[in-house]
Amino acid sequence: MKVSYEGFVEMLSELNQFIANDYNPNYILEVRAIGGFSMIIHKRLGNIDGPREESRDIDSLTPDYPKEIVDEIMRIGEKHGALDADGWLNNHWNRTKEYREEFEFFIQWKRVEDIQLSNIIVYYADLEALFLFKIRAMDDRINRAHMEPRAQDVIDVISILRAFEISDLDVINVDLIGSTIQYFPYAINYLIENGLVKGTRMEISNEKLKSFDHTEYFKDRIGRKKQTE
């Protein structure tokens, strides 16, 4: 089941009540949203267009939660019918080492100002970092799983490109996106071949492609400083 922004806020409020009253009033849970929930926030702020009103879960790039909190997340999810296998609030991507180590460095976090809770602070990732997660998800699905990319990932990628007024991948005005698309040739070719964007089709070597390495990316340039606002 997909959940609206308001639905997630209600469940977060219930989880906050559990932490404050039944778990530990001094414990602060940081939610660092990187998936669909983060895209919903950008849509609400007017940063992107597109049909992003609901998400299956909140993907958070955070360390493991205590068992008591995980149990409460699952209980709240069952109560509201949000029965995602990993839980409506989960850190699945934090445990996926390739994604976390490759992309965490680039994320600029901003606090969700209209979610004011005593024991939970919610942050969302910037659009450029979300592009890396989404385009990588597309590329892996095509290259590794030999499947069509998820429609939602495609929609999100196009929404982000449009937010930066990018319609031709040969002409990109955003440094992070322009410098990293070479690492995702299967996804880029899919977008071009399906007429979703313009651009020159990428040649794919028979050799195993090197995964995205931020140390290589920053070798000859000054990188963005990771920050939280």
Image (cartoon, grey):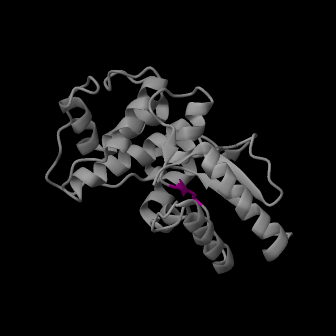
- In what quadrant of the picture does the C terminus appear? top right
- In what quadrant of the picture does the N terminus appear? bottom left
What x and y, as percent, mark residue 48?
51, 28
Q: Quadrant of residue 217?
A: top left
Residue at the image point whose x is 64% and y is 79% from the top = 67
Check if residue 45 falls in the magenta segment.
no
Q: Nearer the viewer, residue 127 or 42?
A: 42
Q: Quadrant of residue 140?
A: bottom left
Q: Is residue 15 left or right of residue 192?
A: right
In the rendered image, the vertical position of residue 158 relative to residue 13, given as above or below = above
Majority secondary structure in the magenta region: loop
Any part of residue 218 in sight:
no
Residue at the image point whose x is 26% and y is 34% from the top = 191
Q: Is residue 16 left or right of residue 199?
A: right
Q: Is residue 156 left or right of residue 185?
A: right
What x and y, as percent, mark residue 126?
58, 39
- Mark count: 0
What x and y, as percent, mark residue 219?
48, 46
Q: Which residues are magenta?
A: 57-61
In the rendered image, the vertical position of residue 228 relative to residue 25, given as above or below = above
